[in-house]
């Protein structure tokens, strides 16, 4: 069943305690820092109804006859992944920028736990039943689902018990109806989402004493005791004409405080279970790394477009040295594309019977995309030239005293008049140079776990036996070496 944008807006409870810049936010649907991204999320719901995009964004379930969202569909075939990529592209086309934490990229974290039902059954079969029910619900009801992994963590040289215990989210007591949890998590989009999959951050789950911290559950964002402490927004810091991306696609990150929040048993996925915590940490992104990395592909396209338009308008694109820099950007872009395409083409059956993108190709693709991003942004910045950071804002282009001078110096030829050059430079500045640009870079670096965890995923999934066997043969090693 597909929701409408209005259904989604109506679902954002007015009672939430949301704060930004020291002020209580009454309504995220109208607040200037939240409204742009809420509008995009609402548009995604509406796109599933509109004739032009309906078949890209949704499908008819063969059993129920209901129309459901492509992004929440459990992936069982290569075509499912091709469809998911097309739906993400449609969303990014509509957003005219990169939005990541809008649901499609986080829902896959639950599919990883679906693959871990055997592990959950060890503790309590009810927990495996809970994950199946929540996945079925996500397919049927299409809630806006986000991700809660990262705690403030405090002093890492100490055990959680030896400092303020709330530095990591933990269970404080059980009640007849569930567990009560306390702590905090960083979550992008939490203030305007419906639910999150909360699970432990990267920590030593082998220590039984940490077991109160080994807890995973589906969090209803309207639960009592939650406080949303948001970072300031980029929307409204400058005009939309000067900062188009900041004003259109900024995603609000939040420290969500759990001040004794009761989680009903039906939402608990594991509790006091270090093996389940270890399992989910090791497999968390086996599906969701694909939509996450696809966002780098879009960033690459936007960088190529901004750089190429710039050198075309200045007549520099015929210079061989400029073409080589553009070619480097194209290699980055196609490197990501190749990893995503091949990971789908060589998809693997998961323990739960789903189709995982081929894991080694997917995780190496994520490392390529994130580690090369700073260098590629710098290359695009270089191709755009210094004018992206020294061009006056739109107000000067409109002021009667200054406009003639800016018209003169920013008009290049008949097809590139000052207004278009100003727009291109403003777009490139917001993509590559602004506060928003720096934030987006950090988001791509960290939002799906830190770089060391990306490399750990590569280490766990690369098949080391091939190179070992080759060298055993090529160096004529004995069968005894291990
Ligand atoms: C813009 C943004 C959005 C985010 N959105 C979300 C979200 O929606 N949901 C969510 O759960 N989290 C989110 N995060 C949090 C993100 O997952 C964390 O930033 C990340 O896990 C790293 O944790 P940390 O920031 O506490 O860094 P720290 O743990 O303090 O690590 C800092 C650095 O120390 C080094 N380091 C630390 N531990 C190790 C180790 N064990 N081995 C090797 N090196 C180590 C690494 O260089 C690491 O990068 C977001 C982060 C950002 C920046």
Image (tube, rainbow, N blue to C red):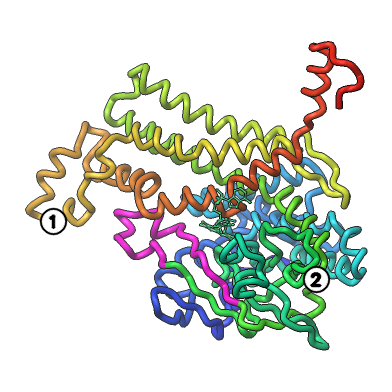
Query: Seen in the image, is 159 located left or right of residue 469?
Result: left
Q: Is residue 129 above or below residue 398?
A: below
Query: Seen in the image, is 278 located left or right of residue 453?
Result: right
Quadrant for the N terminus in the image: bottom right
Whole-angstrom CA distance, mark 2 to mark 1, is: 63 Å
Image point 63% across, 80% down: which residue?
Answer: 222
Q: Look at the numbered disc 2 and give the secondary structure of its residue.
A: strand
Image point 79% across, 32% down: which residue?
Answer: 463
Q: Are marks 2 and 1 in contact (CB under 8 Å)?
A: no
Q: Is residue 226 visible?
A: yes
Badge 2: how crowded within 10 Å, few (<14), some, or many (20+)? many
**Which residue was labeled with disc 1?**
399
Query: Seen in the image, is 182 located left or right of residue 98?
Result: right
* Between 219 and 477, the one nearer to me in the picture: 477
Nearer to us: label 2 or label 1: 2
* Between 120 and 249, the one nearer to me in the picture: 120
**Which residue was labeled with disc 2?**
271
Residue 51 marker: none
Query: Seen in the image, is 381 located left or right of residue 214?
Result: left
Q: Is mark 1 within 8 Å of ligand 1?
A: no
* Total number of numbered discs in the rendering: 2
Read off the magenta span. 232-257
Could you say which quadrant of the image residue 306 lies in?
Answer: top left
Report ligand 1 position as a quadrant.
Answer: bottom right
* Between 409 and 59, the one nearer to me in the picture: 409
Badge 1: how crowded within 10 Å, few (<14), some, or many (20+)? few
Could you say which quadrant of the image residue 202 lies in?
Answer: bottom right
């Amino acid at each position: 069943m597909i929701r409408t944008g209005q259904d989604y807006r109506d679902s954002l409870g007015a009672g939430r305690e949301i704060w930004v810049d020291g002020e209580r936010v009454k309504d995220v649907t109208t607040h200037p820092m939240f409204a742009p991204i809420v509008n995009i999320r609402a548009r995604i719901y509406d796109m599933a109804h509109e004739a032009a995009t309906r078949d890209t964004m949704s499908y008819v379930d063969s059993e129920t006859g209901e129309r459901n969202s492509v992004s929440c569909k459990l992936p069982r075939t290569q075509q499912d992944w091709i469809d998911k990529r097309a739906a993400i592209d449609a969303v990014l086309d509509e957003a005219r920028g990169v939005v990541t934490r809008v649901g499609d990229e986080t829902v896959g974290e639950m599919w990883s736990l679906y693959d871990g039902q055997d592990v959950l059954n060890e503790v309590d079969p009810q927990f495996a039943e809970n994950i199946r029910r929540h996945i079925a619900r996500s397919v049927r009801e299409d809630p806006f689902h986000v991700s809660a992994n990262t705690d403030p963590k405090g002093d890492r040289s100490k055990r959680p018990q030896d400092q303020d215990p709330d530095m990591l989210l933990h269970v404080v007591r059980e009640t007849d109806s569930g567990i009560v949890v306390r702590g905090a998590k960083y979550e992008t989009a939490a203030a305007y989402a419906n639910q999150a999959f909360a699970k432990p951050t990267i920590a030593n789950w082998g220590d039984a004493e940490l077991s109160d911290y080994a807890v995973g559950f589906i969090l209803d964002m309207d639960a009592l005791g939650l406080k949303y402490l948001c970072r300031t927004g980029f929307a409204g810091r400058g005009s939309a004409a000067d900062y188009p991306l900041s004003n259109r696609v900024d995603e609000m990150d939040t420290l969500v405080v759990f001040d004794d929040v009761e989680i009903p048993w039906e939402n608990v996925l594991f509790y006091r279970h270090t093996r389940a915590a270890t399992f989910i940490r090791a497999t968390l992104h086996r599906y969701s790394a694909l939509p996450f990395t696809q966002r780098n592909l879009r960033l690459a396209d936007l960088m190529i477009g901004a750089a190429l338009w710039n050198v075309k308008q200045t007549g520099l694109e015929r210079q061989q040295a400029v073409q080589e820099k553009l070619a480097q950007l194209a290699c980055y872009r196609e490197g990501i594309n190749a990893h995503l395409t091949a990971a789908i083409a060589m998809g693997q059956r998961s323990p739960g019977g789903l189709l995982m993108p081929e894991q080694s190709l997917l995780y190496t693709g994520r490392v390529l995309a994130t580690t090369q991003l700073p260098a590629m942004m710098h290359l695009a910045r270089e191709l755009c030239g210094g004018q992206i950071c020294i061009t006056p804002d739109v107000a000067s282009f409109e002021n009667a005293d200054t406009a003639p001078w800016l018209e003169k110096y920013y008009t290049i030829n008949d097809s590139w008049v000052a207004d278009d050059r100003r727009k291109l430079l403003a777009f490139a500045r917001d993509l590559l140079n602004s506060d928003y640009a720096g934030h987006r870079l950090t988001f791509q670096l960290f939002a799906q776990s830190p770089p060391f965890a990306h490399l750990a995923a590569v280490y766990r999934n690369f098949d080391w036996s091939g190179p070992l066997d080759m060298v055993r043969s090529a160096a004529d090693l004995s069968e005894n070496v291990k």
